[in-house]
Image: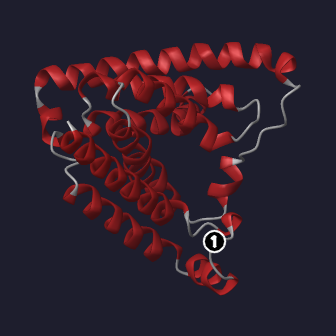
Amino acid sequence: MIERIKKSLQTKLKTLLVLLVTVVLYNGWEPSLGIFPTGFYDFTFNHYGAVDILTFSLITIIAYKNGAFRKFFDIFRWKNLLFILFFIIGGVVFIALAHKLYFQMTPALEAFPEHGVDVANSLARTPFWTHSLDLFVIGPICEELIFREYIYRLFDKKWLACFVSVVVFAWIHTGFTYSFFFYLPMSLVVTLAYHRRKAIGESIILHSSINLINNYLPYLLNFLVP
């Protein structure tokens, strides 16, 4: 009994360490956090693409060594591909409906602080290829590792892991602002997709697809329907 508890604690401590290292590698070099000296942030800004790829490579190596991708290639089975397609279509529809409700309720939510995250402005400060890489590859992979794979490993009760994952993902993107409720639907959809089989590949593809549709579909529709 004692050995089992000891082993469980060791596993959770290791997961917590991996989680913290991944968070620092993924977001620790953002100037707003102020973790490192100013000169370091000047260097990372001037070499943004190279730093992005280097830290992403370290994150994926750490994840691979810790067995995070053990079910990754299972996504190519027909059953799982259909599941992902269903969640992409159903998820986008659900998110669109939730966002419509959100904008209807926004006046009632103004007791909360204003939106805390300006994604468009943040992306505009980087070249197209780097922010595209962040939105569709690096961001989905790193965030799914942090908010799904590692958070789930920290909790024995998976319903609790699901709840924490949904809330923390939305909160990290917005802080305590009413835009929290804007991010919540996507967080719920992606977390439920992961919750089914705990397969990180499925939630990565879903996350990336939702980012792609949300960011480029409006422009495509405006182009096709002037």
Above or below: residue 35 compared with residue 108: below
Instruction: Determine the image quadrant of residue 57.
Output: bottom left
Instruction: Give the amino acid at mark 1.
Output: Ile
Q: Which residue is mark 1?
A: 35
Residue 192, percent from left and from top: 39, 22
Crowding at dot 1, Cα within 10 Å, few <14 / some 14-19 / many 20+, comes out as few
Let me know if residue 88 appears in the view. Answer: no
Instruction: Between residue 201 and residue 224, name the one nearer to us.
Output: 201
Residue 65, how many percent across, how many down?
20, 59
Identify whether 58 is placed above or below 206. Answer: below
Residue lying at the far bottom in this picture: please name it. Answer: 39
Residue 156: percent from the left, percent from the top? Answer: 33, 30
Q: Is residue 184 visible?
A: yes
Identify the image quadrant of the N terminus.
Answer: top left
Q: Is residue 84 left or right of residue 53?
A: left
* Quarter occupied by the C terminus: top right
Q: Is residue 46 left or right of residue 142?
A: right
Q: What's the residue at 68%, 31% (across, down)?
A: 180
Residue closer to the observer: 15 or 23: 15
Above or below, 13 relative to 130: above
> x and y percent of residue 215 in the render?
55, 39
Give the residue displayed 22% in from the left and 20% down from the top.
Answer: 82
Element under disc 1:
loop
